[in-house]
Amino acid sequence: MAEGVSCNNIGPVILLGPPGAGKGTQAKRIAERYGIPQISTGDILRDNVARGTDLGVKAKAIMGRGELVPDDLVCDMVATRLRSADCERGFILDGFPRTAKQAGWLDAFFEGEIFDKSHGDRCLPIVIRLDVDYNQLVHRLSGRRTCSANGHIYNVYTQPPRVADVCDIDGSALIIRKDDREDVVQERLRVYDVQTRPVAEYYEQKGRLVSVNGDLPMDQVTGQMFWVIEHHSVHAD
Ligand code: AP5
């Protein structure tokens, strides 16, 4: 059997959906319930920007405009992360893939490196798309506050912290993400329509896409996600 990443247990979960759909919120809950890591390309990129790495320097202005970071940079970053030992039991990709090229790259990566240690056959990702009304997305992003230390997510309308602008969990300051400015949000939503919506269609054609109503209250969305994860097959037919 080839060396590589195992998909025992949960297998890979891919979360798709527009900015503000609730990917980060739900990914954290899935990670906690199943003990698997959340791999958020947005979080990794923001961390690189904050640390001033070469990748962060290249990504900073692009992210500030609400555009996508070049595919080759993001794919290299994801490959490194997926080869970490903590991905062996499964993982959640939050915000990747986002272009047709990234989706093709990920398929090739799964083909070559993701396998099931116990069965020896190929395992397939479950792809969940959160569908949310456009006006709701804009509203949510206008109210989002993010923990500056660990990325915990709040919302002044629907999920306020106990003390204004302070994270309930670690006490650090809550910030407004730079790309949550209204003009940048409009661009991010436009980019999603043009570049990422076709990725969902790509998985739909392969019969791997499950849509979840992300307009519902958070706990109801979480319930749907858990159900989907626990009732899908990770193995190729
Ligand atoms: P990224 O960080 O991935 O941002 P995004 O995809 O735009 O998604 P968001 O983080 O804005 O929203 P979310 O769906 O996670 O929603 P959340 O749970 O926070 O990417 C940022 C940038 O990095 C990109 O623009 C790009 O430049 C770059 N990048 C990242 N990945 C890349 C890639 N693969 N390729 C190239 N470039 C890449 O929820 C939003 C708010 O709503 C919160 O306040 C939350 O409390 C609230 N909320 C959540 N669910 C509900 C609910 N059910 N009801 C009511 N409120 C809710």
Image: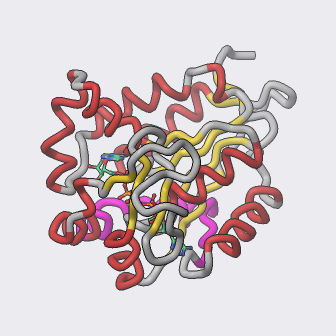
| Residue visible at 21% across and 71% down in the picture | 186
Compare residues 30 and 107 and report the one nearer the observer: 30
Report whether residue 155 is seen: yes
Counting from the top left corner in percent of width and height, residue 113 is at 60, 25
In the depicted structure, whether residue 117 falls above or below residue 122: above
| Residue visible at 69% across and 16% down in the picture | 2
| Residue visible at 28% across and 25% down in the picture | 51
The answer to which quarter of the image holds residue 29 is: bottom right
In the depicted structure, whether residue 95 falls above or below residue 6: below
In the drawing, does residue 218 fall left or right of residue 196? right
The answer to which quarter of the image holds residue 220 is: bottom right
User: Mainly helix, strand or loop, the magenta region?
Assistant: helix
Counting from the top left corner in percent of width and height, residue 59 is at 21, 37
Counting from the top left corner in percent of width and height, residue 120 is at 80, 27
Counting from the top left corner in percent of width and height, residue 106 is at 48, 39
In the drawing, does residue 79 fall left or right of residue 216? left
| Residue visible at 43% across and 38% down in the picture | 149
Compare residues 140 and 69 and report the one nearer the observer: 140
Give the residues drawn in magenta, as a range: 190-213
Report whether residue 99 is seen: no
Give the farthest residue toward the right: 118
The answer to which quarter of the image holds residue 15 is: bottom right
In the drawing, does residue 103 fall left or right of residue 31? left
Q: Quadrant of ligand 1?
A: bottom left
Residue 205, magenta (yes or no): yes
In the depicted structure, whether residue 102 falls above or below residue 206: above
Work out which quarter of the rendered image holds the N terminus and state it: top right
